[in-house]
Image (cartoon, rainbow, N blue to C red):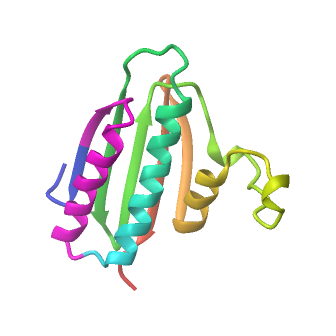
């Protein structure tokens, strides 16, 4: 990948999430991407990775998750790929964020954040892998 890209492979362990966040923060800082944009992007990535690690691997085994980040054409883009259980987050209805807390269903807020914070979110299943792409504009 070009110098405007970051490619990471991590294991499906919770400790991988903060290490990945640090690397993405440095990537954004080195490219002078505005703090609020970098924060939103990293929050979306954190939610995506946490959901995959928590829910995608029912066998209890070790799995790799590939994360590719690109800064190109005015967008910061992430693609997260794993061999976990097929899951299209866009196929699920958004949570009712206006309902009383005690009346809300558990889950779905991470997906809601992803949809709300990013300009584009897309999912596909290909060759036995989940591929989730999201991006946010970094230039006006």
Front-lying residue, 29 or 75: 29
Q: Identify the residue at horizontal 39%, vertical 36% (top origin).
A: 14
Where is residue 28 shown, x and y percent of the image?
25, 66
Position of residue 90 in the picture relative to residue 59 (left or right): right
Front-lying residue, 76 or 45: 45
Q: Is residue 121 above or below residue 15?
A: below
Specify the quadrant of the image occupied by residue 85.
Answer: top right
Q: Is residue 6 above or below residue 140?
A: above
Q: Identify the residue at horizontal 29%, vertical 34% (top origin).
A: 10
Front-lying residue, 66 or 55: 55
Q: Is residue 62 above or below residue 65?
A: above
Position of residue 29 in the picture relative to residue 62 (left or right): left
Where is residue 118 shown, x and y percent of the image?
51, 65
Where is residue 77 shown, x and y percent of the image?
38, 59
Where is residue 12 shown, x and y percent of the image?
39, 29
Q: Quadrant of the C terminus?
A: bottom left
Count of residue discs: 0
Residue 33 forms part of the magenta stretch: no
Residue 26 forms part of the magenta stretch: yes
First to last magenta residue range: 8-32
């Amino acid at each position: 990948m070009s110098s405007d890209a970051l490619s990471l492979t991590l294991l499906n362990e919770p400790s991988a999430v903060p290490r990945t966040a640090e690397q993405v923060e440095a990537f954004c800082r080195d490219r002078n991407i505005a703090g609020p944009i970098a924060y939103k992007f990293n929050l979306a990535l954190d939610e995506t990775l946490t959901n995959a690690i928590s829910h995608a691997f029912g066998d209890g085994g070790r799995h790799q998750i590939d994360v590719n980040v690109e800064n190109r054409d005015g967008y910061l883009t992430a693609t997260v790929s794993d061999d976990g259980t097929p899951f299209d987050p866009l196929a699920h209805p958004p949570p009712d964020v206006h309902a009383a807390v005690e009346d809300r269903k558990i889950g779905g807020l991470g997906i809601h954040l992803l949809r709300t914070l990013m300009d584009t979110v897309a999912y596909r299943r290909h060759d036995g892998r989940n591929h989730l792409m999201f991006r946010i504009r970094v230039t006006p």
